[in-house]
Image (cartoon, rainbow, N blue to C red):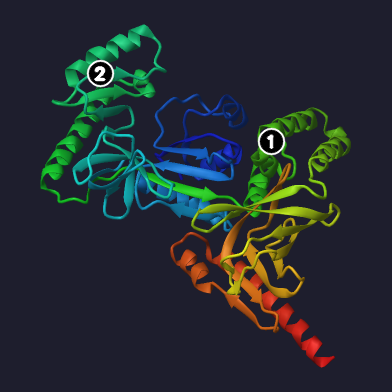
Amino acid sequence: MTQSTSIKIRGIYSTALTKIMLDNGFKITQAAPIQIERFNLEKNFEQPDIEIVDFENRQGIIISGEVSKAQKIEEILRTEFEDAIFRKSPIKLNSLYKGKVVKIDDGKAFVDIGDCFAILLNEPVKEGEEYIIEIVKTGTQHPIATTNISIVGKYVVLIEQESVKISKKIRHQENIEALYSLGEKIKPDKWGIIFRTEAANQNPSTLIQEVSELSKKAKILMKRKEEAKSPALLLEGTENIFIEFTSEDKKRLDNIRKEVVKTINQHHYYKSIGREYALLVDFTEDILTKHPEMEEEVLEFFNKIYIRDFPKNGDQILIEHTKINGYQFTLSGTLTNIDLYKKQLILRRQFQGGGYFDGLNVPKRTGDYGITEITLGTWNLKTEYYSKSREFKGAYYNINTPIEFYPPNRLRYIDLAVDVVKWPNGEIKIIDKEELNEAYENRIISESLKIKAEQKAQEIFDKLKMENERKSAT
């Protein structure tokens, strides 16, 4: 089935994702030279309908573009990656709102737009006044906005300044002059134009048609601006879908990439570590492509480098704990034991007084400590809490996506909400099922991942229950 949607893909997952998109009939545009070679693609510089790029931390991808087209791709990837976490902001990128500034604090103006508060950074606005704002960044606790509004098209952007601007990436003087001349003739009254990079490769008729369509949107905007009461959405922007990959998804991506080009096991995991490992992976796969007979010794050398970067006893270990909703915080502890063969780490975590241990509702006292047991690749980690005098205060079993290690001292996983707790009297309980169910109902996680989390929690509960029964029998 051939799709009319064109997609631009960049990042460490681009080969696997390009194959998925081509297999589903989509058109790839502005492909990187290496992808043109791998997939025998024709060079195509058309402006994409959809862009797919990596997260800044390389742990997933962002799909950006027209709502219906982005959602079609989302559904394909939901089928491919059952363990992935899918998050969407209810606020669309480039959406235009009418909102009131309700608070200004340290250069940040909080604007009530109905669904949430958007933030204007260091803009000359007044508390209590209404403004038309454009959302320029989503995926954060509060979307970031600006009062410098625009209406975005594929090749042209309308701006409030009555001028014609050209993308700096357009360098051919003849193209620049032609676009300036055209822009002066077709820019709408009281609006200016920015010609995007790909405008240089389009027929004037295509650009004229798009400006006409954007002008209609501008008229609708002005009408709604006068009629709407704050807070109000005036024009909806583009969809942004954030897909975070687990280690299981990265393995699936590896297998898809293997159908196209030489790919070592855990390719995408190693690539997500950072630039040094990305270069090492490229070098390793290049050697194996040319000398497949050297695979055993080359991979052995690669593994030695990886093992070299593991922490030693006494090192501080950071635990990157990401909630289902995307909120992230970091825990830390001192490594007291490591077994590389079993991929096990034991950390000691020290606590200050105040507050309660999560899930147990047991007060924290100064001198309390926790012993956290971690096995890489498993779906849970266990922490036992003790008082300063070594009295057992309870245990907490966190259910999460398979734990990954990121050299030199970082562990990461996605918390799947549901947990198991055990008190000193032997009582055991599975907690926070509601949060897991809510994530499923909101389509943040799949039914498959929900079931895996529930089963893992139940396995731990049953094991602890059997231990209690054995103790009672002796």
Q: Residues within 10 Å of mark 2 (few under 14, many from 20)?
A: some
Q: Nearer the viewer, residue 274 or 348?
A: 348
Q: Residue furthest top?
A: 173
> What is the spatial separation of the Cα atoms under label 2 and label 1, in whole angstroms?
45 Å
* Circle 2: residue type: Val
In percent of width and height, residue 268 lies at 66, 42
Q: Quadrant of the C terminus?
A: bottom right
Q: Is residue 61 above or below residue 193?
A: below
Q: Nearer the viewer, residue 206 or 324?
A: 324
**Residue under the point 15% across and 51% down:** 229
In percent of width and height, residue 104 lies at 30, 44
**Residue under the point 33% across and 31% down:** 154
Which residue position is annotated with label 1? 261
Which residue position is annotated with label 2? 164
Q: Nearer the viewer, mark 2 or mark 1?
A: 2
Residue 426 in which image quadrant: bottom right
**Marks 2,1: beta carbons within 8 A:** no
Q: Is residue 27 above or below residue 169?
A: below
* Circle 1: residue type: Val
**Residue under the point 54% across and 72% down:** 432
In percent of width and height, residue 135 lies at 33, 41
Q: Residues within 10 Å of mark 1 (few under 14, many from 20)?
A: few
- SS class, disc 1: loop
Q: Is residue 435 above or below residue 425?
A: above
In percent of width and height, residue 192 lies at 22, 24
